[in-house]
């Protein structure tokens, strides 16, 4: 999608697939609360490598169907390949911009993860998403809250806190709508939609086997060119090849508990 701050490199696609492991429990809860059940027809907006589509496919079963759309053709090809490997024939992917997508048949549900923050006009995006629903259909969104501090640790691990600052600086400057997660109700109202049901969660963990270290290190790695352009970091200042190891070592030594970025989910039935 235009303005997507992470880009579409092979490294970024790998990062997205790993990130999906961390986010899956939260997105799965949203899918359940939206009432997505077997036999439904569901659209996944900004599907990326297909992880949300595959979660939805498990909910709709073989009698249902899922269509995932993303602007990048290579990403869509990877998503289709992964769905085939997972033996999920009920999923189809298309390379298409959200504002250009049309369907002769409406959807029972439309879902998107980390999609509103990349929209220059959230209201127009929401109106488009809602227009693809059948009467009684449900729209669900899973967004990341871009707010400081994005990462916390107790007791404090300075390197973990620093990684959070880097992520905040890059996303706050690079996302088209960095405040989207905190303004869901307002954006939906301005798009003429009802007030949503909502919940928020923060991933939490620690110890040597936590997924957080790789999650944070890979996000910083992908965003490094953007941080350099912003003047937040100088090229070569941060040894990225050891960042994951150093995050793990410092956290384990401190016996710290880590908090990841706040995740905000909302859903509304029309």
Image: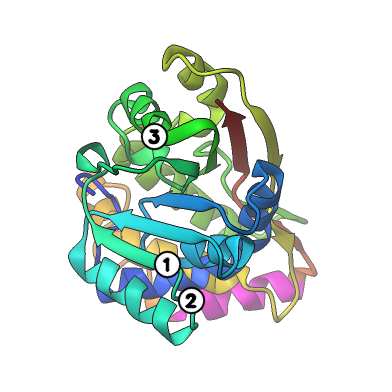
Q: Main secondary structure of the magenta part?
A: helix
Along the polypeptide, which appears first: circle 3 or circle 2? 2
Say if residue 218 shows up in the picture.
no
Where residue 160 appears, as percent x and y from the top left, is 59, 60
- Percent coordinates x, y for residue 224 in the rendering: 31, 60
Asked if residue 261 shows in the view, the reply is yes
Q: Nearer the viewer, residue 141 or 19?
A: 141
The quadrant holding residue 85 is bottom left
What's the image's color scheme? rainbow
Which residue corresponds to mark 1? 91
**Residue for badge 3:** 129
Q: CA distance from mark 1 to mark 3?
A: 19 Å
Q: Nearer the viewer, residue 232 or 89?
A: 89
Give the spatial CA distance, label 3 vs label 2: 24 Å
Secondary structure under tag 2 reads loop
Q: Quadrant of residue 26?
A: bottom right
Start-end of magenta stretch: 242-253
| Left or right for 1, reference 266 | left
- Depth-wise, is mark 1 or mark 3 nearer the camera? 1
- Quadrant (top left/top right/bottom left/bottom right) for the C terminus: top right
Looking at the rendered image, the disc whose residue lies closer to the viewer, 3 or 2, is 2
């Amino acid at each position: 999608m235009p303005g997507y701050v992470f880009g579409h490199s092979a490294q970024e696609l790998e990062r997205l697939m790993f990130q999906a492991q961390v986010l899956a429990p939260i997105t799965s809860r949203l899918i359940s609360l939206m009432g997505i059940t077997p036999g439904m027809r569901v659209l996944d907006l900004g599907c990326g490598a297909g992880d949300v589509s595959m979660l939805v496919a498990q909910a709709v079963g073989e009698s249902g169907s899922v269509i995932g759309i993303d602007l990048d053709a290579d990403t869509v090809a990877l998503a289709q390949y992964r769905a085939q490997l997972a033996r999920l024939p009920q999923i189809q992917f298309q390379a298409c911009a959200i504002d250009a997508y049309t369907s002769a048949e409406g959807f029972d549900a439309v879902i998107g993860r980390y999609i509103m923050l990349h929209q220059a006009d959230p209201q127009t995006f929401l109106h488009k998403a809602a227009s693809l629903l059948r009467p009684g259909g449900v729209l669900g969104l899973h967004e990341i809250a871009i707010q400081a501090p994005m990462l916390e640790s107790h007791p404090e691990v300075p390197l973990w806190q620093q990684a959070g600052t880097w992520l905040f600086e890059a996303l706050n400057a690079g996302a088209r709508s960095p405040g989207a997660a905190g303004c869901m109700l307002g954006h939906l109202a301005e798009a003429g939609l009802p007030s949503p049901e909502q919940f928020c969660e923060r991933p939490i963990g620690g110890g040597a086997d936590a997924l957080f270290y790789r999650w944070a290190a890979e996000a910083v790695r992908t965003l490094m060119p953007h941080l350099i352009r912003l003047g937040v970091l100088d090229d070569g200042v941060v040894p990225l090849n050891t960042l994951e190891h150093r995050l793990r070592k410092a956290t384990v030594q401190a016996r710290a508990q880590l908090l990841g970025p706040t995740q905000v989910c909302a859903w509304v039935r029309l």
